[in-house]
Amino acid sequence: IGGGGAFKQVLVDSGVDKYIASMMHETNVSPLLMAWSIAAVLRIALGSATVAAITAGGIAAPLIATTGVSPELMVIAVGSGSVIFSHVNDPGFWLFKEYFNLTIGETIKSWSMLETIISVCGLIGCLLLGMVV
């Protein structure tokens, strides 16, 4: 968790958060979809949902101020994105694999797909809530 906070701070100090916020002014992408995407990419690249959520939260925070999106919905979007597609770089993947005595392929077909479905359903729910909140 400490590594996630440190990584987030490195990205914030390097100006990545401001760059992404400035990109939002040039595009019509929903800030919720952008926050979900950032968290999802970090999750797949880094493996840790906690690190992905902390880092994406730090990067996406300026989007709240610049777009006026609900902070609560931003938390849901980041949280949903941070659980997408657990694979071999995630300790939880190996825990699930060994506990149920599965092969890597079986674990991807079950655990990774379940995590992806949860993530996408969370995004859809968040976007639907965004239409009424």
Image (cartoon, grey):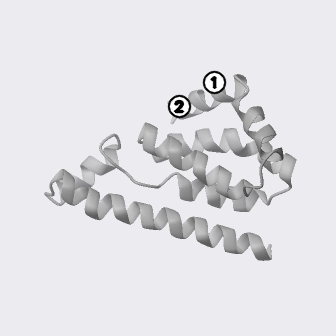
Q: Which mark is residue 2?
A: 2
Q: Mark on residue 10?
A: 1
**Image vertical order of residue 24 relative to residue 119, above or below:** above
Q: Kindly state the secondary structure of the residue where label 1 is placed.
A: helix
Q: Amino acid at mark 1?
A: Val
* Image spot of residue 49 (x, y percent): 47, 47
CA gap, disc 1 to disc 2?
12 Å
Image coordinates for residue 80, horizontal then vertical, percent: 55, 59
In-image side of 108 versus 35 (left or right) = left
Q: Residue at x 73, y 61 (%)?
A: 72
Q: Residues within 10 Å of mark 2 (few under 14, many from 20)?
A: few
> Residue sitting at 55 percent across and 54 percent down?
81
Tell me the quadrant of the picture where the C terminus can be found: bottom right
Front residue of this view, candidates 46 and 21: 21
Mark 2, secondary structure of its residue: helix
Q: Position of residue 26 (x, y in %)?
A: 81, 45
Q: Amino acid at mark 2?
A: Gly
| Near-viewer residue (29 or 33) | 29
Left or right, 25 with respect to 106, comes to right
Does residue 116 lie above or below 66 as drawn?
below
Q: Of tags 1 and 2, which is closer to the observer?
A: 1
Residue 94 placement (x, y as % from top left):
25, 47
Which quarter of the figure has residue 25? top right
